[in-house]
Amino acid sequence: MTLSAPYKYLLAVLVPLLVLLVHSYYYYPFFVDDAYISLRYAQRLVEGKGLTWNDGYYVEGYSNFLWVLLVSALGWIGFDLVAAARAICLLSSVATMLAFARYVERYADGKAGTLFLANIAFAFTAPVAVWSIGGLEGTLIMALLSWALVLGLPLTEAPNMKRAAYAGVLLGLAAITRPEGAFFTVMLAGGIWLFTPLPREIMLRPLALMCIVAASFFAMQLGFRLYYYGEWMPNTYYAKVSGVTYARLLSGYMYCIKATASFLPLLLVVCLQFDKLLKPQNRSRKQVVYICLLAIIGWLAALTMAGGDMEPSYRHILPLVPFFIIMVIEAISIDQSASKNMPQSARKNMIFYGYLFMCFLWLQHSMEENDKHFYAAWEVKAMELGKWLNDNYHETQPLIAVTHAGAIPYYSKLPTIDTLGLNDLYLTKHRSPLFGHGLLGHELFDAKYVMSRKPDAVILFTGRRDWLYSHELVTNPEFRRSYKEVEVKLPSYTPTIWVRRDSKKLVIR
């Protein structure tokens, strides 16, 4: 049963695609609040205001440059930006499935059964389903890395300048999609260099070309950043990245352990065939496994030092999904080859794989991070409040301060202070000496700074009260003298915001 049969090929792709669509719909209408930060930049770019947060305020509060440009491009031709972001998310997941199809056909056993098992495991992976509609760039970098692997891994067997250049382009695009794209360029090139059986001098030119092409994308973005924002790093780096601290290591370690645990059944498939994969006659498969393991271990180590991530459903594990799935493809392929003359053994293996698959499904939906109830509806409430602000105060343009810089600023289109610092240069340049010991991305709130900006309104919650920040601010006597708490009656709920008593731009009657 090979991919040469068109209907088998279609079934091996379309059935898992249908499963992915249903699985993603299970999490609908999830759209993470931070995605609206990128959409605000895209929105302002489409409106001719540049890649800015507020008028005349140049700060790079995003770390997904290519993603913002792609969403903006769809916005220019008339797409709603939320729909555009969802479409790119889903299409990226589809592109990843097609990359697996290409890999199975060209470099594995070419069997439709192997492709089907790989794609169905991919479709049932909860982080993939969540972020196929979640509005951020995780699935895009996953797709770019998948195709870079398809083109790059065969270089271990035969140097090919054209293939290396294509892989370099994909890795370069990944590098301007997320900073970790540059990391995987180093991992892939280093893995090929270390594990190829070919003479190193033969591999030097294609690997150098791949790295130079990828680095050129990174260099162009860096040049743009220096010219446009006057910074070497995006503002999000200064808002989140600290030196290595105990708090960061502990948070990152727990994040990586839990994220990897959800893939244990897939990894067990690889482990069961590990001895066969490493046999001398399976040299090409051994090299693929070593390269994938190098990338996985390296990225998990980097994530541990960085402190993991605050977004739900293990967003930062998505770049590793192609490496997991390709190792599974190799393991299934070698198992099918070993048992093709042993029907009884093949049946037992299928039963065992079925059991592992059921364990995999259970893990995907038993872990708290992948539970759909984790995704509260407060983003929807924030959207409602943002639209109300835009409808009533678009002309007066009051300055608002928010603790969640996504949906409210995006839908209100009002000048906004991001009190957690992702989009605020002052806060990232005046970090506390204790920075790096608190909650990742939530350490820069400064009550005195917020009051010094004299916003017309301070929004400390979006359907839920942010007590970490509200306590520091609302217990301040000066703040209570200058601001009053006002209820806003909206169709679905009644939020409370703090309005400046002498504001002429934002008056709630």
Image: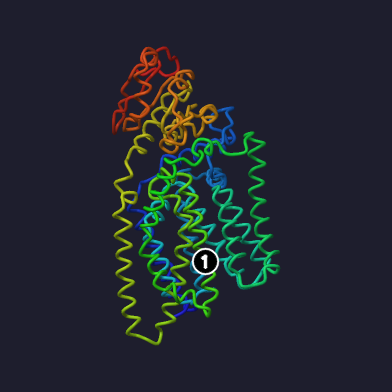
Please give the name of the residue rendered at 49% of the width and 29% of the height, measured from the top-left corner.
433
> Left or right: where does residue 460 sit relative to residue 209?
left
Give residue 366's position: percent from left, percent from top.
29, 54
Could you tell me which residue is drawn at 57 percent across and 44 percent down?
A: 65
Q: Is disc 1 placed on a helix, strand or loop?
A: helix
Q: Nearer the viewer, residue 160 or 90?
A: 160
Quarter of the rendering occupied by the C terminus: top left
Q: Look at the image and tell me in which quarter the N terminus lies.
A: bottom left
Quarter-of-image position of residue 284? bottom right
What is the x, y in percent for residue 232? 62, 38
List x then y, in percent, for residue 505.
45, 18
Q: What amino acid does circle 1 point to?
A: Tyr
Q: Which residue in the structure is indicated by mark 1?
A: 290
From the viewer's perspective, is residue 459 above or below residue 407? above
Q: Residues within 10 Å of mark 1 (few under 14, many from 20)?
A: some
User: Seen from this angle, which residue lies furthest bottom?
Assistant: 341
Compared across the picture, whether 110 is left or right of 18 comes to right
Color theme of the render: rainbow
Does 339 sit above or below residue 506? below
Q: Is residue 463 left or right of residue 421?
A: left
* Front position in the image: 114 or 438: 438
Across and down, in percent, residue 248 comes to 44, 42
